[in-house]
Amino acid sequence: MDRYEPRHTDVFGPVRLSESAVDESYLEVGYTDDDFGTSMIAHLQTFPTVDDTQDAVQELLAADVFEQGTSRIIDDVDEAREWRRVFYTRNDVTLYAFMLELGRVLVTLAPSETEWANRADWPGPLADCWLADTSPLET
């Protein structure tokens, strides 16, 4: 499963920095409840150092990826992570996604043609996982 690529990973094309990244992978974040299951794809790139991650983000923002503020996946938690709201064009379609630097790792997730605030199913499975906030898990 080292090179597993979920369907539709081509939507991450403009945020891929494979030359400077040490590793690249995809993660499906999801859950199943009584009604249905849902998931979304996250793209992860690992860099040699934190500085390399920061440089990579600046490189992306200087090229074909644009930033429009930040958002929290969950609003009512003090430890909620601030995600960059980014957008880019892929195959003549504008995609809106979220990007987060986690040390040496750059996470991009949930690319969609629907702008950030207009997503009916948002944040879906992310509200209850470690990507949403920095607080420790309750035991």
Image: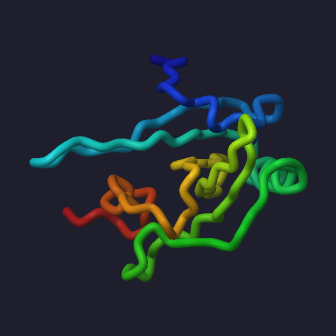
Q: Residue furthest right?
A: 62
Q: Is residue 132 left or right of residue 93?
A: left
**Residue for point 38% across, 79% down:** 77
- x and y, in percent, of residue 103 in the image: 64, 54
Q: Is residue 80 above or below residue 17?
A: below
Quadrant in which the C terminus appears: bottom left
Residue in view at x 59 percent, y 65 percent: 83
Q: Is residue 20 visible?
A: yes
Q: Residue at x 66, y 30 (%)?
A: 23
* Rendered image coloring scheme: rainbow
127 in relation to 82, above or below:
above
Would residue 118 be found to the left or right of residue 34 on screen? right
Residue in front for this viewpoint, 29 or 56: 29
Residue 70 pos. (x, y %) = 63, 72
Look at the picture and state if 75 lies above or below 46: below
- Determine the residue located farthest toward the front in the rendered image: 92
- 30 relative to 18, above or below: below
Task: Please give left or right for residue 23 compared with residue 118 in the image.
Answer: right
Q: Residue at x 52, y 23 (%)?
A: 5
Q: Specify the quadrant that holds the N terminus.
A: top left
- Measured as percent of width and height from the top left, residue 118 is found at 49, 66
Q: Nearer the viewer, residue 136 or 72?
A: 72
